[in-house]
Image (tube, coloured by chain):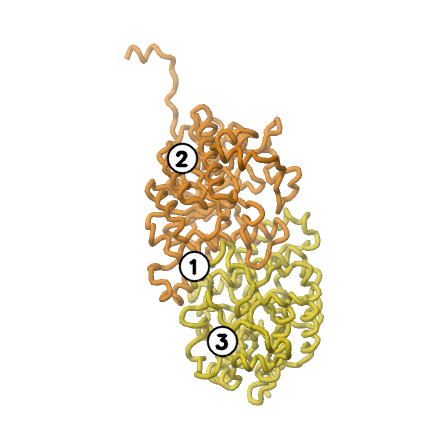
Chain colours: A yellow, B orange
């Protein structure tokens, strides 16, 4: 029986009154977007039908989600990653919503009487508000079940730029990885593709997650991993497959440009091991093709990719559907070892 | 018979098979030449309305000296690389060994669509008079591109109509940056004109400045390094748009060439799009085939820049898995600093794919590219 860590489970407030009950004034009286997007929302709804129940929001009930994932689907440990309400123009409001979300996450989920010991949490911070983010980090970083810090994939400025460095430094010092994930809600985001708004959800979904490539290449060129050797990143929307061609490109183009970026002297791909991780997405990879094992080995992806279901989203990925051509060792790395090492969960998985 | 015997004995020109079709060669007008071909009033009101200097950002290494060019491609009197057809002929055809060069004049978009169209028109007149004329193209190795301002669909279609049928025009050429992406129906007149004349449409990155750059959704790169690497995402998104917006359902004979956007990303992207199609096909009922099938039937990629891993066997595998012989065409990018020599490039291709990538796909894709050309003395042998 293999051990399974689900590295991407999304949790939510039950409804707006639940959120507002976790906010203080003046924030509890503010206008706040809901989780769902209008344009760019998935036709048919964001969530798998079997995670929906009348009267509760999907991913808002720890007992129900715990039963569905930990009991019915054989997950041993779940890394929870709460969504917030968009990248908001008012950073104070965004940080207040992040703080409310973290209180809900810790008290409702991580301290849950039945499943709490099998949940680990991602606290949310607003990277446009460095002071607020550092404060939120200080509040939660020593909680034994907080294992990660979450930031939106959406941004106006790439994450390699120095304005974010105080956050990366503090997170690295706290020993917590940073998970980058597409934010829910309606924010002040740029169009999701470099050519503007897509006309179909299929195109939105195809491109949106790949925006991590802009962040990653910029962080490499800016020398972020030289400055913060303990910084660990998780790109949590899938798309890790595209890493291989883009790193070939980054390496090939890297040597001639070294004179412009002497602070990042190593080959770009040398900055990946130990720093960069991916959640495996449902639409990643060649499926059950025979070469899937060879492909996972390229660029060291077999040591970077972690299984994550994205529960309760429509693109829920079942661990039974992972490529059949992977070796047993690759399967164990993706289902367990990579996440156990990153989140230091080996001891939590020992038999009682 | 007697007439023939009275002439001096000249051997008949020897025809040799085309072995290398070079899909990306950049000619540049000499200073002051292009303005005369831009129609008024746009010439005076926009292009010559005020002086301005270099507009470079995201500079290639050693830009102040090399200008992102092969330094040996400047002419002896300091002329810009690509400005002298004779030097280009010697360096690319004779010395590097390309047989046919597909000319792709650069040129950013100009904010006002009609201004772009006027400039593109001038580039076409200029190619016709300065590169494709019989005095310059005596060797018949140059093929031109019908430059079209896609952001002005009616103007672009008219430009295609004007030049289609030219004996040395091989394709339509558009910039990669105008928004929205290519699947939007506003561009249909351009595709319709191209299809009507059985011309492929090549899409080349053209940078631009200010908000004409590709607009990364999460922020601008810092350096030419991360800028050029992530430029490929623009083309990846164009592929998604063309497939999911049903462009190839509307134009079943349309052929697209994505030039200088790199290509190895298409391998995982085809898997991704096929998986998304499986998951979301009820949203897009007009899309009737798997994305990878549309891609292999309708889109070609050019080889330069060839990005390669430390373990070259991985590249070989990628060529095989993506069926590179169906989707790739050789390109050198002469005279840019990132020039890929055909003799170097061909060695990276699996042997069984070399003919397809180096010339067969080019001959099949482009208009007016012959299977045989007149032999040239001293020309380099590629493979």
Where residue B146 sits: x, y (%)? 42, 37
Disc 1 chain ID: A
Q: Is residue B296 above or below residue B360?
A: below
Q: Is residue B76 above or below residue B348?
A: above
Q: Are marks 2 and 1 on the same chain?
A: no
The mark found on residue A199 in the picture is: 1
In front of the other: A74 or B15? A74
Q: Residue at x 46, y 62 (%)?
A: A204
Q: Residue at x 52, y 52 (%)?
A: B232
Disc 2 chain ID: B
Where residue A238 sits: x, y (%)? 51, 66
Q: Earlier in the sequence, mark 3 or mark 1?
A: 1
Task: Tell me the distance, in whole angstroms, between the alpha carbons under discs 3 and 1.
Answer: 26 Å
In front of the other: B291 or B10? B291
Task: Tell me the distance, in whole angstroms, between the alpha carbons under discs 2 and 1.
Answer: 33 Å
Q: On the image, which quarter does residue B242 sit in?
A: bottom left
Q: Which residue is mark 3?
A: A311
Q: On the image, which quarter does residue A148 sit in?
A: bottom right
Where residue B20 sits: x, y (%)? 44, 38
**Is residue B165 rendered to the left or right of residue A161?**
left
Nearer the observer: mark 2 or 1; the answer is 1
SS at badge 3 = loop
**Is residue A201 rendered to the left or right of residue B339?**
left
The mark found on residue B169 in the picture is: 2
Residue placed farthest to the bottom in the image?
A: A113
Q: Residue at x 45, y 34 (%)?
A: B124
Q: Are marks 2 and 1 in contact (CB under 8 Å)?
A: no
């Amino acid at each position: 029986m293999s051990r399974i860590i689900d590295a991407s489970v999304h949790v939510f407030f039950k409804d707006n009154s639940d959120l507002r009950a976790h906010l203080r004034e003046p924030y509890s009286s503010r206008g706040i977007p809901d989780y769902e997007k209008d344009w760019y929302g998935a036709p048919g709804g964001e969530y798998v039908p079997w995670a929906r129940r009348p009267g509760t929001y999907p991913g808002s009930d720890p007992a129900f989600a715990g039963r569905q994932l930990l009991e019915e689907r054989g997950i041993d440990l779940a890394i929870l990653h709460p969504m917030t309400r968009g990248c908001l123009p008012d950073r104070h409001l965004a940080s207040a919503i992040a703080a409310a979300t973290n209180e809900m996450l810790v008290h409702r989920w991580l301290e849950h009487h039945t499943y709490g010991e099998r949940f680990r949490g991602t606290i949310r911070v607003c990277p446009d508000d460095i002071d607020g983010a550092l404060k939120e980090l200080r509040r939660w970083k020593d909680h034994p079940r907080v294992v990660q810090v979450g930031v939106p994939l959406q941004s106006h400025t790439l994450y390699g730029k120095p304005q974010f460095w105080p956050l990366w430094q503090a997170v690295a010092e706290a020993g917590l990885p940073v998970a980058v994930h597409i934010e829910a809600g309606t924010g002040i985001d740029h169009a999701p593709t470099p050519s503007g708004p897509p006309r179909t959800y299929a195109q939105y979904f195809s491109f949106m997650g790949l925006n991590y490539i802009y962040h990653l290449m910029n962080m490499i060129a800016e020398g972020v991993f030289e400055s913060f050797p303990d910084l660990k990143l998780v790109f949590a929307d899938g798309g890790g497959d595209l890493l291989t061609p883009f790193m070939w490109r980054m390496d090939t183009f890297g040597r001639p440009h070294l004179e412009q970026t002497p602070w990042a002297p190593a080959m770009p791909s040398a900055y990946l091991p130990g720093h960069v991780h991916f959640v495996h997405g449902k639409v990643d990879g060649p499926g059950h093709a025979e070469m899937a094992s060879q492909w996972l080995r390229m660029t060291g992806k077999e040591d970077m990719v972690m299984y994550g279901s994205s529960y309760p989203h429509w693109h829920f990925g079942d661990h039974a559907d992972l490529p059949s051509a992977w070796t047993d060792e690759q399967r164990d790395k993706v289902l367990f070892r990579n996440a156990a090492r990153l989140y230091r969960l080996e001891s939590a998985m020992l038999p009682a | 018979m007697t007439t023939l015997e009275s002439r001096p004995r000249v051997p008949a020109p020897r025809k040799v098979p085309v072995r290398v079709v070079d899909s990306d060669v950049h000619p540049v007008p000499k200073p002051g030449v292009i303005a005369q071909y831009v129609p008024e009033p746009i010439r005076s009101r926009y292009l010559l309305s005020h002086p301005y200097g270099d507009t470079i950002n995201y500079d290639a290494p050693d830009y102040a000296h090399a200008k992102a060019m092969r330094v040996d491609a400047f002419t002896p009197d300091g002329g810009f690389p690509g400005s002298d057809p004779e030097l280009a002929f010697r360096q690319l055809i004779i010395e590097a060994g390309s047989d046919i060069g597909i000319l792709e004049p650069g040129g950013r978009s100009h904010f006002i669509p009609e201004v772009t169209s006027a400039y593109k028109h001038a580039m076409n007149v200029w190619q016709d008079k300065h590169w494709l004329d019989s005095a310059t193209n005596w060797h018949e190795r140059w093929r031109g591109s019908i430059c079209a301002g896609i952001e002005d669909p009616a103007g672009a279609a008219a430009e295609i109509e004007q030049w289609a049928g030219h004996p040395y025009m091989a394709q339509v050429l558009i910039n990669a940056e105008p928004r929205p992406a290519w699947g939007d129906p506003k561009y249909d007149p351009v595709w319709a004109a191209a299809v009507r004349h059985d011309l492929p449409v090549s899409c080349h990155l053209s940078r631009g400045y200010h908000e004409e750059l590709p607009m990364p959704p999460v922020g601008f790169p810092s350096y030419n390094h991360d800028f050029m690497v992530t430029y490929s995402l623009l083309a990846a998104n164009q592929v998604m748009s063309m497939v999911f917006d049903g462009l190839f359902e509307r134009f079943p004979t349309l052929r697209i060439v994505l030039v200088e956007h790199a290509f190895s990303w298409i391998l995982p992207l085809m898997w991704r799009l096929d998986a998304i199609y499986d998951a979301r096909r009820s949203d897009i009922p007009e899309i009737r085939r798997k994305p990878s099938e549309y891609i292999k039937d309708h889109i070609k990629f050019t080889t330069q820049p060839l990005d390669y891993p430390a373990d070259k066997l991985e590249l070989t595998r990628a060529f095989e898995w993506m069926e590179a012989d169906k989707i790739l065409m050789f390109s050198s990018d002469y005279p840019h600093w990132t020039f890929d020599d055909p003799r170097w490039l061909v060695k990276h291709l699996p042997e069984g794919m070399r003919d397809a990538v180096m010339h067969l796909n080019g001959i099949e894709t482009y208009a007016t590219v012959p299977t045989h050309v007149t032999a040239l003395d001293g020309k380099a042998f590629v493979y």
